[in-house]
Image: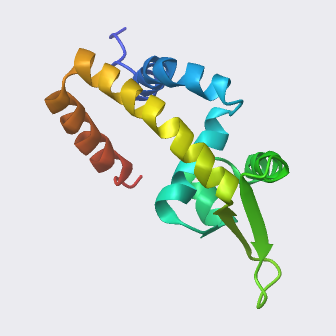
Amino acid sequence: MANPRPSLTLTLLQAREAAMAFFRPALNKHDLTEQQWRVIRILRQQGELESHQLAQQACILKPSMTGVLSRLERDGLVRRQKSSQDQRRVFVSLTERGEQCFVSMSEGMESNYQRIEEQFGAEKMEQLLALLNELKNIKP
């Protein structure tokens, strides 16, 4: 029996875990989960989004997104607002407290990116991000 090819999906997960090891301590310090931070970061970058768009961009399943948003709303970091034209549409945005959370975490997160780049190399990081962006766009 021939040896199986290396697993792309497993390697991607292992690389993600290696990268997240740099960021988890800061998330824990701020009492945020990885999913919550993704939501905050995306809303900071994109502005207000419909909940389904946010779920897609954050790679969070819609049923899980409901819980993530409930906790962020409870903590005063996001607000959800139903569309006046269509009550099924829910828009999510950062509150002022959510904006402040992002700003307060940004410096620490940036220093983690710099630590990764020091070990991995700026050029390789640029190449990796470009390749991953290409990979994201392939269709099954």
* Residue at 46% across, 29% down: 108
Q: Quadrant of residue 43?
A: bottom right
Q: Is residue 44 above or below residue 109?
A: below
On the image, the x and y values in percent for residue 77 come to 72, 51
- Asked whether the viewer can see residue 66, the reply is yes
Side (left or right) of 100 relative to 72: left
Side (left or right) of 58 relative to 137: right
As drawn, which residue projects farthest toward the bottom?
Answer: 85
On the image, the x and y values in percent for residue 71 come to 81, 45
* Residue at 75% across, 46% down: 68
Task: Between residue 94 and residue 136, name the one nearer to us.
Answer: 94
> How many tags in the picture?
0
* Residue at 75% across, 63% down: 79
On the image, the x and y values in percent for residue 4 come to 37, 16
Q: Is residue 95 above or below residue 88?
A: above
Side (left or right) of 108 relative to 61: left
